[in-house]
Amino acid sequence: MSHIKIINCIILYTLLFSSTCKKQECHYDISINNNSNTSVIYAKKAILDNTSKCLLGGYVLKANEKYIEHSPRDCWEDRLSNVSPLEIFIVDTAKFNSPNVFYDCDSIEIKNNILKHYVLTLDDLKQSNFIVTYP
């Protein structure tokens, strides 16, 4: 190998391994905290393809319980950077829509007793450290 090739290899090696890479923050979990003294349902809206039919699907959170919403493929920063905000509904367990029965999207409040409706942007989640607290 000539001296020039060796010097070029050393320079290339130095450039490649001396640079610092700043890893982008990436959150895969959002914590949903029920700080109330009653059970509630944590729910998200599901929309039937190519229709205006919806339903809420969710999980019962007992009093003072938390649920971790995990994004298995993409971090929340990537999922919410170019799309509409994340909608989260907190619903009364006494009035929650029937599972797997779709209805007109404008009937969500008729079919459910919505206690709180969150419309969260990526900035909102960053400000709350990816924690959503009810109430």
Image: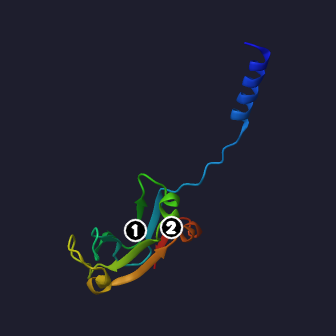
The mark tally for this picture is 2
Q: Nearer the viewer, residue 12 or 28?
A: 12
Task: Write down the quadrant of residue 50 in the picture.
Answer: bottom left
Quadrant of the drawing holding the N terminus: top right
- Relative to 84, is 55 on the left or the right? left
- Three-letter code for the amino acid on which mark 1 is drawn: Glu
Q: Is residue 61 above or below residue 25?
A: below
**In the rendered image, which residue does mark 2 sit on?**
131
- Relative to 44, is 86 on the left or the right? right
Is disc 1 surrounded by few (<14), some (14 to 19) or many (20+) residues within 10 Å?
A: some
Q: How is the image coloured?
A: rainbow
Q: Nearer the viewer, residue 29 or 26?
A: 26
Task: Write down the quadrant of residue 5 in the picture.
Answer: top right
- Relative to 106, is 31 on the left or the right? right
The residue at 47%/63% (across/down) is: 30
The residue at 62%/48% (across/down) is: 23
Give SS at disc 1: loop
- Three-letter code for the amino acid on which mark 2 is drawn: Ile
Residue 46 screen position, x and y as percent: 31, 70
Quadrant of the drawing holding the C terminus: bottom left
- Tell me how far mark 2 sits from mark 1, CA to CA: 13 Å
- Of labels 2 and 1, earlier in sequence is 1
Q: Is residue 77 above or below residue 102?
A: above
The residue at 66%/48% (across/down) is: 22
- Relative to 12, is 47 on the left or the right? left
Q: Nearer the viewer, residue 134 or 121?
A: 121
Closer to the camera: disc 2 or disc 1?
2
**In the rendered image, which residue does mark 1 sit on?**
65
